[in-house]
Image (cartoon, helix red, strand yellow):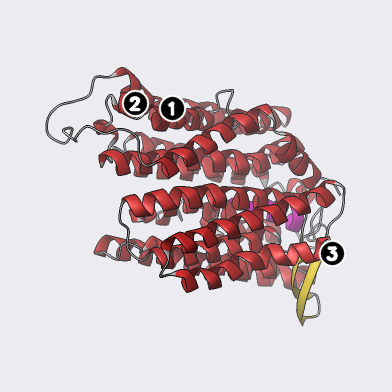
Amino acid sequence: MTAPSAETLVLLAVLVPFIGAVIIPLCHAVPNLREAVTLATAGILFAIVCALLTPVLGGARPEAHIINVTPGLALAFKAEPLGMLFALVASSLWIVNSIYSIGYMRANDEPRQTGFYVCFAVAIGSAIGIALSKNLFTLFLFYEALTLSTYPLVIHKGNEEAIRAGRLYLVLLLGTSLVLFLPALIGTYALAGTLDFTPGGILGGKVGAGIIALLLAMFVFGIGKAAVMPFHFWLPAAMVAPTPVSALLHAVAVVKAGVFSILKVVVMIFGVEALSAAGQSLWLTLAAGTTIIAASLVALRQDNLKRRLAYSTVSQLSYVILGAAILAPISLIGAAIHIAAHAVSKITLFFAAGSIHTASHLTEVSQLDGIGRRMPWTMGAFAIGAISMIGIPPAVGFVSKWFILSGAMQTGNWIAVAIIIVSTILNAGYFLPIVYRAFFREPHVGKHHDAPAHGEAPWPIVLALTVTAAGTILLFLMPNVPYALATMMMER
């Protein structure tokens, strides 16, 4: 039997999650079979993405062309280094998140579990479509599909708070897309005559600095999933969803689709040289820095654990934007690596938050005194995720932050240097007290702290968070694949 071609693999990578989404509801009556289909689909997708990795690292750029819409505008896919990095993140973490979801959804007796797995599969398929898009048109279509497929997950609980959060989710994400992202896309097509992602960009030499500044601002704020302030409110509000959904939003697909899209637009639509010539580094540095610092300050004041993690995500996402804003090759490499670093670290933190809720029904930071003695695996994993977010070795967050900081110092962008230093201190300020409480304080006895004795959450939850915590360390020790893909992203 002949192995499928790389071009066929590109198409299969996009199709497989959607095929899984069709099969999952057919197994509704047998939960074990339904979840086996989910795991099998995730495993097949990861195997396909891994099979694509070798030719891409070898210099191939396989494509799958679907249909021409107009001359120069097509629905098409292409495997290139930055997209492969995002596809690896989404496909690998889908497996772990599925294991976690099985334990979490059953232990908490969540309703509508079949619909949950269906929407999750569609969301992952949309994320892979974004990762492998050959052009902005294809990316935009799957970007919107990702918004629509995750809306039912945000409102999963069906209560008034969830409905309100879902409404804000749709209004902000669809609103920014239609008011800013889509007009920027149309303007780019009118000016460049194409929307194909091209190393070095497609706008250089075709428009002046003013038009470049306007289009860049429309992309940065129009891609609302990147949660750049002031279009970030949807993310903390969406924490009403079950923890596996929070992990999807923060680590696997949604916010990663946002920062990935901005980074790809910077590198392959504008081009680093065109943005440097147009003097776009300063304002983008300030926009990213404002989000990083302001969100960190808000996180310091949050007692609810998931909301603290949500504002941490708002802050950490803008490290990718900051790395792009510095416009140095090494900072752009750091920005790409941070997509993977943040994904594996933040999913660990959310997994731990869900584990705590499942085992002890505690949700507030102030309730966590001594919990590390009852849940050492959970809180040990949380500690690893936390040091990665701060940027302390031996966790992978150190690698991406070091590259971004190096780029800032190379270019003399001292504003970016100050932002990274101050935000690192703030990160420590809202993460380390949680770890200290968990392991070094005596458990409280009294109101809100009298939860019955408990141990760890069910084993699928603990297994998943242990795997992602180990991945956080392994990526620090062996960052070869993310580094190679990020470096190849910069090649012309």
Q: Amino acid at mark 1?
A: Gly
Disc 1 to disc 2: CB gap under 8 Å: yes
Residue 66: say if magenta.
no
Q: Of residues 311 and 304, which is closer to you in this image?
A: 304
Q: Amino acid at mark 2?
A: Gly
Which label lies toward us, 3 or 2? 3
- Pointer 2: what residue? 372
Badge 1 crowding class, 10 Å Cα cut-off, few under 14, some 14 to 19, many 20 or more, is: some
Q: Does dot 2 land on a helix, a strand or a loop?
A: helix
| Residue extent of the magenta highlight | 259-270
- Pointer 1: what residue? 380
Q: Is residue 216 above or below residue 352?
A: below
Q: Of residues 123 and 390, which is closer to you in this image?
A: 123
Query: Quick check: 12 left or right of 21?
Result: right
Give the CA separation, mark 3 to mark 2.
Answer: 53 Å
- Pointer 3: what residue? 1
Residue 34, position as x, y percentages in the image:
48, 64
What secondary structure is the stretch in magenta mostly built from?
helix
Q: Of residues 326 and 478, which is closer to you in this image?
A: 478
